Image (cartoon, rainbow, N blue to C red):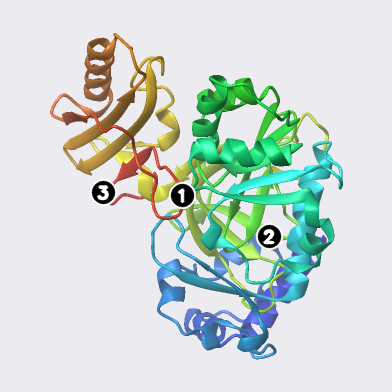
Amino acid sequence: MVQNKKVRAIVHHAYEHVPFYHRKFHEAGVRPEEIKSVEDLCRLPLTTKTELQATSLDKLVANTFDVKDCLKKVTSGSTGVPLTIAYDEKAEDMTRAMWARAYVENGLSFTDKFATIKDPGGDFISEGWFRRLRGHWEKDISIFDSPEQQMKLLGVFRPDVIKGYVSSLVMLADFCQEREREFNPHHVFTGAELLYETDRKRIGSAFGCDVLDYYGSAEFSLLGWECESRAGHHMNTDGNAIELVKDGEVVSPGERGEIVCTGLINYAMPLIRYQIGDSGVSIKELCPCGRSLPLLKMLEGRTGDFLVTLDGRLIPPTAFSPYPFGSLEGIRQFRVIQEARNRIVIQLVFEKGFLGEDRVLNRARGEIHRVFGKDMQVDFQFPERIEKDSTGKLRKIMSHVRAAPA
């Protein structure tokens, strides 16, 4: 199996040439020759973002590379703590090939015009040959521009494909609904945040086209992507080994687990059994589309955003669409924040002229009490708008209560 061969190669390389992993494997009492397949990865210790942040880059980059010559990306991610990722040109080329496969498999062509609404501070230092080759077929638009500014730029560029954060595309879709569009994309790709089905319909209705989601991270770029069947995210197993782990053990298909990833293409800064911080569910069955790449059936959000009931049960972020509102009618934006074990704050921005506020509040309070317990304090706040964080994301569910998914 090609993936097992890649696993053996990257583990051996990390042990021999990366000081961080040489020490880590040695302390765990594991030799690289003991790792012969993806199933053997569970013998290796997990790697956390905190560990990487506490380690100098020269200890994380393989001694077969010069740190100064590596391509680099600095990301804050959802935690807001910077992390530098180094990678080599071959890894960059492979990453772009995986993106190209996801696009081509969904019927896109090389000459389609792409508009990407993104954080302008999150760029790779090198755009690479692929971006230079495509030139005028691609345009970046800042996620921090207003929907009006974004619409003007899109109207001039007239993209065939739009890609961006879910929350940004929802805001743009709401803006589009009230105005005539000067462009007609045939695909919209969402990412970076959980895609609720209500948001998918909202975006698709506004742009009159298919909406497909991709799953990635700054550390590994594209990990998975939806096809037209929307049965789950096809995992790029030729570029990554993805495990779902609970209490240190790999879970069975259909069980929820924390997503742990081993990169198979970046030899400059290998990441072995890295805890991304997300949770999901996989299945054994192949996608109805017939493609052989396995499916990540359900993405349930960042592990730190699971809410905790008074009796200790965990509620994933995906439960809040449209729970606890019954529907999202009249609601322009919302955010649910668990401030403490016994206190939840719900921020709501209503549509102008909506007359059902009391009904929405009463239902939300009742549903929170039903699920979380009657002693859960529920407070409402009514800001004019809910602001994005520094990366341009708009997290709908936030928790300040430490808990790991069950």
Tally of numbered tags: 3
Identify the disc placed on residue 392. Answer: 1
Query: In the displayed structure, does residue 82 sit left or right of residue 361?
Result: right
Give the CA distance from mark 2 to mark 3: 31 Å
Q: Secondary structure at mark 1?
A: loop
Q: Which badge, 3 or 1, is on the more N-terminal residue?
A: 1
Q: Is residue 403 above or below residue 92?
A: above
Q: Secondary structure at mark 3?
A: loop
In the image, what residue type sits under mark 2?
Asn
Viewer-proximal residue, 395 or 352? 352
In x, y percent, where is residue 157? 72, 41
**Badge 2 or badge 3: first in the primary sequence:** 2
Residue at the spot of label 2 = 240
Q: Nearer the viewer, mark 2 or mark 3?
A: 3
Quarter of the image with the C terminus in it: top left
Q: Work out whether residue 394 or residue 231 is closer to the camera in this orientation and state it.
A: 394
In the picture of the structure, the residue carrying the numbered disc 3 is 400
